[in-house]
Image (cartoon, grey):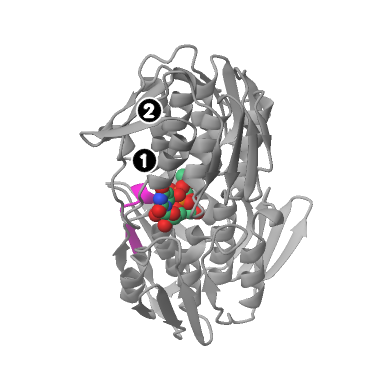
Amino acid sequence: MDRIRITGGQQLNGTIPISGAKNAALPLMIASLLTPDTITLKNVPNLADVSLLIRILRNHGVDTAVDGKRANGNGHQGDTLHLTARDIVDTTAPYDMVRRMRASFWVLGPLLAREHQARVSLPGGCAIGTRPVDLHLTGLQALGAEISLDGGYVVAKAPGGLRGGVVSFPKVSVGATHNVMMAATMAKGETVLENAACEPEVADVASCLNKMGAKIDGAGTHTITIQGVEELEGATHTVLPDRIETGTYAMAVGAAGGEVLLEGARADLLPSVLEVLRQAGLEVAETNRGLRVARNGAGLSAVNVTTEPFPGFPTDLQAQLMALMCRADGVSQIRETIFENRFMHVQELARLGADITVSGDMAKVRGVAALRGAEVMATDLRASVSLVIAGLMAEGETVVNRVYHLDRGFERLEEKLGSCGARIERLSS
Ligand code: EPU
């Protein structure tokens, strides 16, 4: 297993290109199951989760191709992926695949819409919480799906096809919104999703589905209306920039100091995050090439944050902000309301000398004068990158173990940080 070694104390200066969003690319790839025609996705990040989903989709019969290097490419524009589900040859998504990537559970809706049946393994729990799928199932049932559980699998059938309905989600769920929205594109009649997730990735998927011929209104708000159509066709779509990667590198600049252009980043995708970072003492400016983030000389101020669905502060940046607050002036209170077990980084940050106490869903971070490098590891993607951020400001060497978590969601992390002056290297085993 690879490890990453960081020698702290170097400022970051330069340009970091922001990749396409993992959490949009995955559902966009899954949307290819809805049509026999080809879906071409541009700006797809080169990540372990994308490769795994390609394997999962192939198992359903999807032909996949990735464009090779292009003469005018600068290597930072992401991959172009062509996905063609001419015939669905298998409507089962096996446990061995779904357990490795929860988002693959979202094939349920599209398979049901196109094939009127699916058998998809329950994903099981994961490091950040229990993560049930009840909202996905009740949503699909509202569209007429008959659902039963058999040996750890969800068995779903809609013999005469799905029909439109009203789905009022009791809780905001990104995944359930994607799943039911994709299913509803080919249901008979109108579907209304109330209390839908309004994350930018949902709007991005809806925009691609509309290019495919779907009739979706209101994606990006809490009420989405879908008029079902008979069939969908091929389309070409460019994945939007990754707001979590953007926020992560902005916090890395906050941690290390310096000035970096986050190329291609869009301020409208992370309004609450930028506000929090400004409160913490970072300078953030929008330019026509992206976001310029700087911390020159000034110290960090403590901020209080509660994670919330979009447009609130995202849970996927909670760990990174906590790392940053370890060196802030004062006490920062960070409340996690989305996942019940997403403080796994606290004990690892403590190994670097952080002073954090957790009580229920609240972490209190008392800023310390210095962090000191140590060997650490984390059990999920965002927690792992929070340790990289801490390593950038720690004295001496920090070694982050279990780098495969980072490879799931951060493309060429050590190259992007290294090109701006970080002393960071991958140690291959
Ligand atoms: N929930 C239920 N029942 C359900 C579905 C969700 O109770 O049927 C609960 C969850 O347990 C959680 C809350 O609702 O407490 C929100 O979960 P959501 O369904 O929104 O999460 P998700 O769709 O499984 C996506 C992202 C996560 C991100 C969350 C929240 C992808 C591939 N994953 O997960 O990203 O944290 O939304 O914004 O889009 C990551 O990228 O590291 C990551 C974990």
Residue 56 is marked as 2
Q: Residue 62 location, x and y as percent? A: 45, 19
Along the line of sight, the residue nearer the viewer: 158 or 272: 158
Residue 359 visible in rendering: yes
Residue 101 is marked as 1
Q: Amino acid at mark 1?
A: Met
Say whether disc 1 or disc 2 marks the residue closer to the N-terminus: 2
Q: Amino acid at mark 2?
A: Ile
Image position of 404 (left or right of 202): left
Along the line of sight, the residue nearer the viewer: 143 or 359: 143
Please identify the residue farthest to the top as the structure is shown: 87
Magenta part of the chain: 399-407
Which residue occupies 53% across, 14% down?
36
Image position of 216 (left or right of 350): right
Is the residue under label 2 in contact with that under label 1 (CB below 8 Å)?
yes
Describe the element under mark 2 as helix, strand or loop: helix
Q: Residues within 10 Å of mark 2 (few under 14, many from 20)?
A: many
Q: Is residue 215 above or below residue 384?
A: above
